[in-house]
Amino acid sequence: AQSVAQPEDQVNVAEGNPLTVKCTYSVSGNPYLFWYVQYPNRGLQFLLKYITGDNLVKGSYGFEAEFNKSQTSFHLKKPSALVSDSALYFCAVRSGTYKYIFGTGTRLKVLA
Amino acid sequence: NAGVTQTPKFRVLKTGQSMTLLCAQDMNHEYMYWYRQDPGMGLRLIHYSVGEGTTAKGEVPDGYNVSRLKKQNFLLGLESAAPSQTSVYFCASSYSLGSGELFFGEGSRLTVL
């Protein structure tokens, strides 16, 4: 079965420190992988995606993600966290042509 | 740019009542989706549509119906609301071609008493 796992319910990081939000996946074939961010009382916003090519993908707001095929991971990273990065982050994988499977989400809290 | 618009944003129902959530997108997207978001469970797909006049069941379709009579609109109906349908509902859309990231509405918070 195809699935996405986000092993951490919450990640705390000090402002200015690097952050990592973890995601692993299980999917047949080549994965299309996505990260979305959700701010309080808002819909999800697209951050970045991996389709093919360079394993390091850059996205919005200074975020990047590293695709690792051998470890079936797609971790979200940022070199220097901001308080305004505090939000709920979702990893997702596209299953087939038009269906998406989401992880359960990781709450990122950046402490001033 | 409106993007994906959901109405209403909030609604309180009594058990057994019916209601319809409306999703409208102005991006000429082929694919549209209804998800529900519950704490600790992420987003679960209720129903989806790959084009005007077509709908299909997702992961948790029971108790819901949908219609896509026009390409820009995707309606989610609850015929007889139950407390288990208390949730935040999100509509999303995407292009049929390309890598297809999803564009989400702002959500509709439904409480069933």
Image (cartoon, coloured by chain):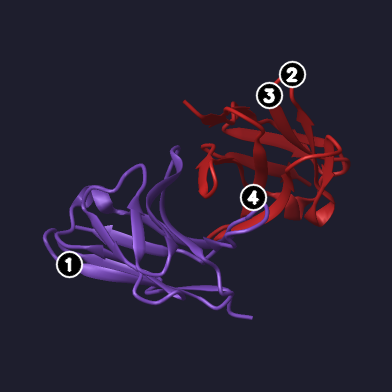
Place of residue A9 in the rendered image (x, y in percent of width and height, measured from the top left): 57, 33
**x 46%, y 64%: residue:** B107
> Which mark is drawn over residue A72?
3
Place of residue B113 in the rendered image (x, y in percent of width and height, measured from the top left): 19, 57
Chain letter of the residue beneath label 2 in the structure image: A
* Label 3: which secondary element: loop
Tags 2 and 3 touching, CB below 8 Å: yes
Looking at the picture, do discs 4 and 2 lie on one chain? yes
Tags 3 and 1 touching, CB below 8 Å: no
Q: Is residue A93 left or right of residue A59?
A: left
Alpha carbons under labels 4 and 1: distance apart = 32 Å
Q: Which residue is mark 2?
A: A70
Q: Earlier in the sequence, mark 4 or mark 2?
A: 4
Chain letter of the residue beneath label 3 in the structure image: A
Alpha carbons under labels 3 and 1: distance apart = 43 Å
Label the red chain with its letter: A
Alpha carbons under labels 4 and 2: distance apart = 23 Å
Place of residue B54 in the rendered image (x, y in percent of width and height, measured from the top left): 36, 62
Label the purple chain with its letter: B
